[in-house]
Amino acid sequence: MNQQSNNKTREIEVTADDLPLHCPTPAMLLWNSHPRVFLPIEATGEALCPYCGTHYTLKGGAVAGHH
């Protein structure tokens, strides 16, 4: 059975404490998630997950000099 569900765009705001950022995040259900992918959000302050389309925004904007 091939059941499709609606793709709902998600907007998630993260902080510097959430870095390095990866999707799915620890708050997401893992049993139905895609493989973990790390997202480079530090330079631009925004990242888009290539698997699920979740848009992440870094609260406070880009991080200068983050190691």
Image (spheres, rainbow, N blue to C red):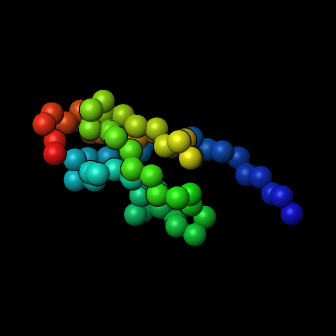
Residue 4 lies left or right of residue 37; in this view the side is right
In percent of width and height, residue 65 lies at 13, 37
Residue 26 sits in quarter: bottom left
Q: Nearer the viewer, residue 10 or 67?
A: 67
Farthest bottom residue in view? 31
In percent of width and height, residue 48 lies at 46, 38
Farthest top residue in view? 44
In percent of width and height, residue 32 lies at 60, 64
Residue 53 sits in quarter: top right
Q: Please determine whether, in this image, residue 23 is positioned above or below residue 40.
A: below
Residue sitting at x 52%, y 67%: 30
Residue sitting at x 22%, y 47%: 16
Label total for image: 0
Q: Nearer the viewer, residue 17 or 65?
A: 65
Q: Quadrant of the C terminus?
A: top left
Residue sitting at x 56%, y 47%: 51
Q: Quadrant of the N terminus?
A: bottom right
Farthest left residue in view? 65
In percent of width and height, residue 18 lies at 28, 53
Residue 32 lies left or right of residue 44; in this view the side is right
Q: Please determine whether, in this image, residue 51 is positioned above or below residue 1.
A: above
Residue sitting at x 61%, y 44%: 8
